[in-house]
Amino acid sequence: MSGIIGSRLNVRGSGIVAKLGTDGQALTSSGAGVAAAFEDVAGGISWQSVETGSTMTAVAGKGYPINTTSNACTITLPASASNGDQIIFSDYARNWGTNAITIDSNGLNYQGQDDTFTVEYTTDGQNLNIVYSGSTKGWIPIDDDAVADVPIKGNQEGIFGFGHTSSVQSVTNLVSNAGVIATDVSGVGSARRQIAACEYGGDKGIFGFGYTSSVTGVTNLVSNSGVVATDVSAVGTARRQLAACSYGEDKGIFGFGNDGSVTGVTNLVSSSGVVASDVSAVGTARQYVAACEYGDDKGIFAYGTTGSNTAVSNLVSNIGVVASDVTGVGTARSNLAACGYGYDKGIFGFGDNDSRVSTTNLVSNAGVVGSDVSGVGTARSGLAATQYNGDKGIFGFGYDGDLTAVSNLVSNAGVVATDTTGVGTARYILAACSFN
């Protein structure tokens, strides 16, 4: 097959009917008759298992989900066909725009062209529904439209912000939906360190609390385009060395920290970004804790120090209620970070247990913390983490004996990648959250 059909002869809609006469002559032509005419044919389609090969041979009367994630696919149509034979192909992984399907009409015509022409379909999300119409036109598409994009799940971008160099900072760095950290954005709001951040409203974020020259409860909202707003007056106990995560799909919670001594107090964040007054502490009071989401709508605080490192955790329900202590799993440590991955799971990583580590612990979609996973990347503490691209995560910045801006991506299976060269101001004891 050679050449390219640059513009297919699209003969869809009211002019195409289910039952065709010889050489494509329509037996029914009214628009109202189209759906009814095709009902018998479409109803007889037998859907097959997902096809992942680079070649396949199609059989009339069957439907094929075609997954081209790893390779393109050449599809050979039947060598003979009868009028009304139908085959459906569907872009299983929405990847035909990268790896196309090619149709080999196997000696028969395709939209009136012989099989010396190359027929490719190169649109993500496309469904191709073809019927044999007779020898003149051969196989013709009755539908080759792309299915609309599925709703985006999870925030696509992230932001690292605030922290400490030789002084407190308010600088921020955006994270793209490909996990690329951008250069510094000039700080907005009170420069501070030992801060926390989480999502709210489904697509926005909030930085809160921390330490300037004293502990503070001031917050800064992050818009769904990653713009940090000016200070909002403090609500709740001013403190530092705390953590935050989202819950209930559109709300957040700040918890634990140090207000002159370790505390377990929490503050809920509404779906409009309003921080509520203190909720009495539940669980072991501690500082340098981390938190992340799990199970779509719940959260978890874990690890930290009470004066000595601990691995204890506390689950957060989908209405923001913090549960009592769960016995620690994994290396007890503090000054670590955590984020979500895989849409409904989480990961705690790095930190300090008298020496800096790169150990990670996965959190299941039921909130169960897994045992230690050997570290990948530079061991460090005082870093931050956030999700990106809906189902992936990124650890960034921190202290490895010196300040660093190195980052490590987390796949949607919870696998941590090797170091990515740092971008932006190297700093530590900062925070991160996602936005959309």
Image (spheres, rainbow, N blue to C red):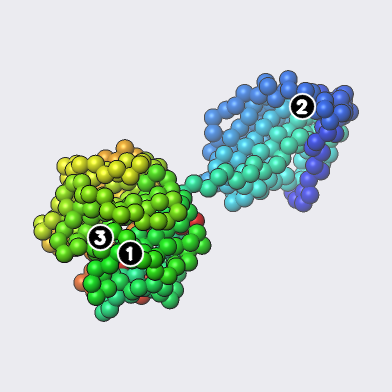
Q: Does residue 50 lie above or below 400 as drawn?
A: above
Q: Which residue is labeled 1 in the image?
A: 234
Q: Does residue 205 lie above or below 322 as drawn?
A: below
Q: Who comes first in sequence, dot 1 or dot 2? A: 2
Is residue 345 something one can see in this rendering? Answer: no
Near-viewer residue (389 or 135)? 389
| Residue at screen point 39% across, 60% down | 206
Is residue 274 something one can see in this rendering? Answer: yes
| Residue at screen point 67% across, 43% down | 146
The spot of residue 203 in percent (x, y) is 48, 54
- SS at mark 3? loop
Q: Which residue is labeled 3 in the image?
A: 237
Q: Is residue 77 left or right of residue 21?
A: left
Q: Who comes first in sequence, dot 3 or dot 2? A: 2
Pick the quarter of the image with the N terminus. top right
Q: Which residue is labeled 2 in the image?
A: 35
